[in-house]
Image (cartoon, grey):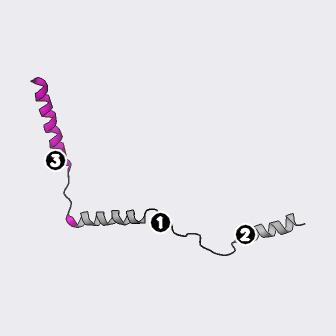
Amino acid sequence: MHLASKKVKLDNAFNYNQSNTSMTTSKRVAEKKVAKFEKNITKRGILQNQRGNKGLEPIHIFLVLFAVLFIGS
């Protein structure tokens, strides 16, 4: 009987903490969070072409000059 009363006290303590720690959220805020989450989910795994085709960059020109001047001579 003594153990059962401790269990009831612990259960009441857990229920008390759970009811006090939950916060109410407005419907508008909740919908905004859900929309933001869904937007992130749909964007996951999509990579943009960040480099693109820029043509000759300065490093390419330098490497060509290096190859022609030092290796070709």
Q: Which residue is mark 2?
A: 60
Q: Nearer the viewer, residue 48 or 14?
A: 48
**Is residue 71 toward the left or the right of residue 16 in the image?**
right
- At horizontal 20% and vertical 63% (from top left) the residue drawn is 26
Q: Residues within 10 Å of mark 2 (few under 14, many from 20)?
A: few
Element assignment for label 1: loop
For the residues carrying marks 1 and 2, which lies nearer the camera in this image?
Answer: 1
Residue type at numbered disc 1: Ile
Residue type at numbered disc 3: Ser
Cα–Cα gap, marks 1 and 2: 29 Å
Does residue 2 belong to the magenta stretch?
Answer: yes
Badge number at residue 46: 1
Does residue 67 lie above or below 2 as drawn?
Answer: below
Image x and y of residue 30, in percent:
25, 63
Q: Which residue is mark 3?
A: 19
Badge number at residue 62: none
Task: Report if the CB atoms under discs 1 and 2 are less than 8 Å apart.
Answer: no
Image x and y of residue 52, in percent:
59, 72
Task: Report if the CB atoms under discs 2 and 3 are less than 8 Å apart.
Answer: no
Using the rendered view, name the quadrant where residue 71 is placed: bottom right
Cα–Cα gap, marks 2 and 3: 65 Å
Element assignment for label 2: helix
Segment tinted magenta in the rendering: 1-27
